[in-house]
Amino acid sequence: MALLLQYTLIYASVLLLVALGGCFSEHSGVINLGLEGIMVMGALGGALVMKGMADLPALLLIVAVVFGSVLFGVVYSLLLAVAAIHLKADQTLVGTAMNLLGTAAATVFVKALNMAEDASNVSSSIQYIEQKKAFSLLKIGNFELSWFMVLAVVLLVISHVVLYHTKFGLRLMACGEHPQAADSVGINVYKMRYAGVLISGMLGGIGGIVYITAGVSEWKFENGVAGFGFLALAVMIFGQWKPGLIAMAAVLFGLFRALSNVYSGFDALAALPIPSTLYNMFPYMISLLVLAVFSGNSRAPKAEGIPYDKGKR
Amino acid sequence: MRRENEKKSFEQLLNREGVQSLIASFICIVLGLLAGYIVLLCINPAGAGRAIVSILKNFMYFPRPAVALEYFGSTLAKTAPLLMCTLSILFAYKVGLFNIGASGQYAVGAGLSLYLALAFQMPWFVCLAAAMVGGGILGGVAGALKAYLNVNEVIAGIMLNWISLYSVNMLLTKVKESSTTYTGALRTNSPGALLPSMGLAGLFSGNKYVTIAIPLSVLIAVWVFVVMEKTKLGYELKATGLNKNAAKYAGMKEKRNMILTMVISGCLSGLGAAFLYLSGIEQWSCAQTAVPAMGFNGIAAAFLGMLHPIGGIFSAYFIQHITSGGSYIDKMVYCSQISDLISAIIIYFCSFVLFFKVCMKRQLSKKKGGQ
């Protein structure tokens, strides 16, 4: 039971962080379908820090890892920002390209790194068994509270405050609802959209490092993040683009994802004649169901996906 | 005088839409290759030039023409399924839908065709039809979700991709070889399910993977072109894509059109999978944890081919050419994923095509203004 709770919370943290990222981007008016790629890049950044600075004291290591992920995520999200905001590219296509590029680039990079160290090592994995221990905050029996869970909650509160209680957040949302109106009162729509996309890069990057350190102590970058970026978008839609609701949706989805990891530990579940593959499918099926029910009268930002053109009315 | 005329006709040529598209595609390829070359340089400057040349040479790596021809046949055999995925994606895109679920439809096509072939020893045309129906139904589901429940087809497509991948793995585990994770080889277990070669193999030094799939896929590309450009159905579908509400106002069944589009698109992807697996060139691994890349490469090829079915034939070949070429680079220094990286970069640049075209037009009109 403790294990189920732990996995639920850690996967919920991942989904929450990435969905909040998507939320900022969409509120500014840019659909971020490249979250998957951003997660991979963030994971790469964090993993490289863990590999390169393994000797740092625990607390410093956490800060460094998060910083590495944020840096990679933000820089990578610039690809979307420039294409969608300045070059008025098709945001769906750019997002898809970023997802493919993220996995391919990370694989090529890690393989090159591994081969440079040891010519016979052609794997695309990075190991972090020892370093991972730093992320544990406290342990009660089987349950392990991770620093990342705390970080996710803190960022949730900050996101809520920023979106609804600051000048910046309200302006950001105005750009996603009616950019022309926002521009007419002197808000720089381009700047706001850049901010939205870069924040989503930051949160997506952190989500990536949390995901790869969730259950395992080495990551094979060839695998990407198995549709988690898109699950997070489903969480965001389910959460009606509101941080509070997103958090609840994330916990629900996290639970289903966690089940596939730990179901064999429950006698009642293990006895059921359900193949393990079916548990793997659960999160995707649930999200499809949720999308079918909640997309009908969606409260998506009105101007999302439409490039802003000053000359248009 | 004559020179001026030549200059004028050259400018007219540049003003034509098709020529501009061609130039834009070409720019995408060059930028993609350049970026790939830079990455190779960063990894190891010494062999970078040779590596990029081997990617571009692909089967020409073999000096003997007979062997090269055989490997050319293999590249073509893999181009046929890619072309089908390309057509699937561009067909849906013309109607304003982004069929990222092509990979899932492809997986279902592979699953059904291989299962029928290995479990029931069905002949090839039954397997082909099953793959088509399976892909079509899955596409239809995504289309219906979009039409009736307003579900974003990209997110629904990704979810369906993973669901179908896991289901197909489950299904095909029943017919896999006992010692490996791969499905049984068709040549030994169910020769009747192999696509007939009709003498095409003889043209490629006896490469037995060269089957009727290759000419068939080209014919289907032509069919897609005819349907899109010359029929009432194609006109209605495109009108729905341009403006759903206007289409409805004009008396078209916009919901039916959306679903129909996705069904056709799904059929194409499903068929693509059958084209690959029923040629026997590859076996499905039931331990696969990644959605088939073919559907995503199809996106690259569709946009590189300027969303034109005939352009798609060439772009699909090009993408497959460099993907196959990736396996010829020096594996001691580089990894073969470098070609995935190049095609990903090409897709990224493809999204700027509109921007390239606008720049070109601006340059041309500037010149005109000056004269």
Image (cartoon, rainbow, N blue to C red):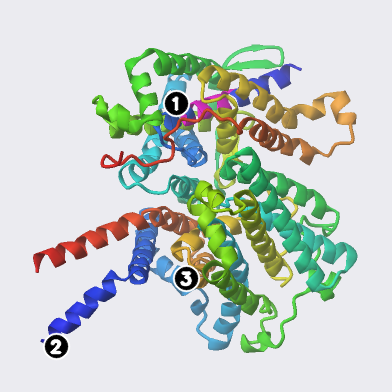
Q: Specify the segment rendered in magenta.
A: A13-22
Residue for point 50% across, 63% down = B301
Residue for point 37% across, 25% down = A174
- Residue B311's label in the rendered image is 3
- Residue B130's label in the rendered image is none
Is B324 rendered above or below residue A267? Answer: below
Q: Is residue A138 left or right of residue A198?
A: right
Is B291 rendered above or below residue A184? Answer: below
State the quadrant of the C terminus of chain A: top left
Q: Main secondary structure of the magenta part?
A: helix
User: Which of the two marks, 1 or 3, is nearer to us in this view?
Assistant: 3
Q: What residue sits right under mark 2 in the picture? A: B2
Cα–Cα span, label 3 and label 2: 33 Å
Is B276 rendered above or below residue A75? Answer: below
Mark 3 crowdedness (10 Å alpha carbons): few <14, some 14-19, many ≥20: some
Which amino acid type is shown beneath numbered disc 1?
Answer: Val
- Residue A66's label in the rendered image is 1
**Protein chain holding label 2:** B
Which amino acid type is shown beneath numbered disc 2?
Answer: Arg
Cα–Cα span, label 1 and label 2: 67 Å
User: Secondary structure beneath disc 2?
Assistant: helix
- Closer to us: A131 or B5: B5
Provide residue B7's location: percent of width, then percent of height: 18, 79
Provide residue B156's location: percent of width, then percent of height: 62, 42
**Protein chain holding label 1:** A
Residue for point 35% across, 60% down = B31
